């Protein structure tokens, strides 16, 4: 009977440990076995372990890409959500980011290449 209880507690701690590392970008299967073998100690380890550094770095890079765009007129770095380029002052809504054509202010798509124009979210 004791072995069975050990097995059940191992499973519980294994599942808890793998859940604890889920958002940290770590190997869930590996941590399931650590929780299974070490019980409470495995779970504590899973809770206090730091986030996977490499994955954090990737997320920061993706974030930067979405925030910054290049002005179609002067290639200056511009923040997403801005209406006008801070360097040359063009209206970003009118300029096509694909072919650099100036469109009407109320246009949704570029009259030259058909690409959807910049929109504020
Ligand atoms: Zn500009
Ligand atoms: Zn265009």
Image (cartoon, rainbow, N blue to C red):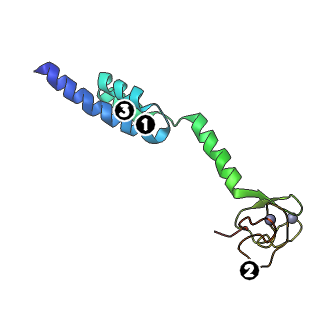
- Nearer to us of marks 2 and 3 is 2
Q: Nearer the viewer, residue 96 or 45?
A: 96
Asked if 80 appears above or below 25 in the picture, the reply is: below
Q: Nearer the viewer, mark 1 or mark 3?
A: 1
Residue where numbered disc 1 is placed:
21
Q: CA distance from mark 1 to mark 3?
A: 11 Å
Give the alpha-carbon distance from disc 2 to disc 3, as whole Å.
57 Å
Is 56 or 105 nearer to us in this picture?
105
In the displayed structure, 8 sits above or below 59; it is above
Q: Quarter-wise, where is residue 29 in the image? A: top left
Residue identified by numbered label 2: 106
Left or right relative to 54: residue 39: left
Q: Secondary structure at mark 3?
A: helix
Where is mark 3, residue-wise?
44
Q: Are marks 2 and 3 in contact (CB under 8 Å)?
A: no
Say whether marks 1 and 3 touch (CB < 8 Å).
no
Residue drawn at x 30%, y 25% is 36
């Amino acid at each position: 009977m004791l072995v069975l209880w050990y097995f059940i507690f191992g499973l519980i701690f294994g599942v808890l440990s793998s859940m604890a590392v889920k958002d940290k970008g770590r190997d869930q299967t590996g941590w399931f076995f650590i929780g299974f073998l070490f019980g409470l100690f495995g779970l504590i380890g899973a809770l206090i372990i730091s986030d996977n550094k490499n994955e954090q770095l990737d997320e920061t890079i993706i974030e930067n890409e979405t925030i910054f765009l290049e002005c179609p007129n002067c290639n200056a770095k511009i923040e997403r959500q801005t209406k006008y380029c801070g360097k040359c002052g063009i209206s970003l809504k009118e300029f096509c980011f694909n072919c650099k054509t100036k469109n009407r202010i109320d246009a949704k798509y570029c009259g030259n290449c058909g690409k959807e124009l910049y929109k504020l979210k």
